[in-house]
Amino acid sequence: MRLRRHVSESHESSHGIDLAPMLDFVMNLLIFFIITAIFLKQFGFPVNRPEASQSNSESSSIQIQVLASGEVFMDGRQVEVRAVRANIERLKALKPEAGVVVIMDPTVKASLLIPVADQVRQGGISNITVLESN
């Protein structure tokens, strides 16, 4: 009988889980993460936004309007897509540092816009801005 008692007593004492090693490990991890988080730096770069006086570059730019019907307007007159290059070359001679603003209708397809942009680039201006009209 003693043998049975002895076995049952040792069995009853082994029912607990020792959490002390796990708590030590968690504390070490916490200390490690706190120390390394202090040395993290976020890098960024400054953004220079244009002032109100600098945003007046639209008046010195060449404006081209492209309508959904395929009509192209420059200087308030209708031109064909093939004539855009000649007009750009003429206007570039008057304003050498000017860019081009293409104002397009929201329903204009890329098949109408791309030839206009190609003509502008062939005319010698690579600074092209595309805007959507309201």
Image (tube, rainbow, N blue to C red):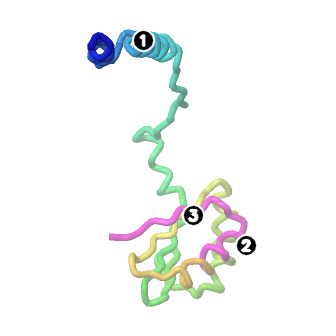
Q: Quadrant of the C terminus?
A: bottom left
Taking the magenta stretch, the answer to whether it contains residue 123 is yes
Q: Quadrant of the N terminus?
A: top left
Image location (x, y in percent) of residue 22: 40, 16
**Would you identify the image quadrant in which residue 98 lies?**
bottom right
First-in-chain label (2 vs 3): 3
Which amino acid, mark 1?
Pro
Which amino acid, mark 3?
Val
Taking the magenta stretch, the answer to whether it contains residue 127 is yes
Q: Secondary structure at mark 1?
A: helix
In magenta, the rendered stretch is: 116-134
Q: Secondary structure at mark 3?
A: strand
Q: Nearer the viewer, residue 60 or 19?
A: 19
Residue topped by disc 1: 21
* Residue appearing at x 41%, y 69% in the figure: 132
Q: Residues within 10 Å of mark 2 (few under 14, many from 20)?
A: some
Q: Residues within 10 Å of mark 1 (few under 14, many from 20)?
A: few
Q: Secondary structure at mark 2?
A: helix
First-in-chain label (2 vs 1): 1
In screen coordinates, is 11 left or right of 85?
left
Work out whether 36 lies above or below 107: above
Residue topped by disc 3: 100
Residue topped by disc 2: 122
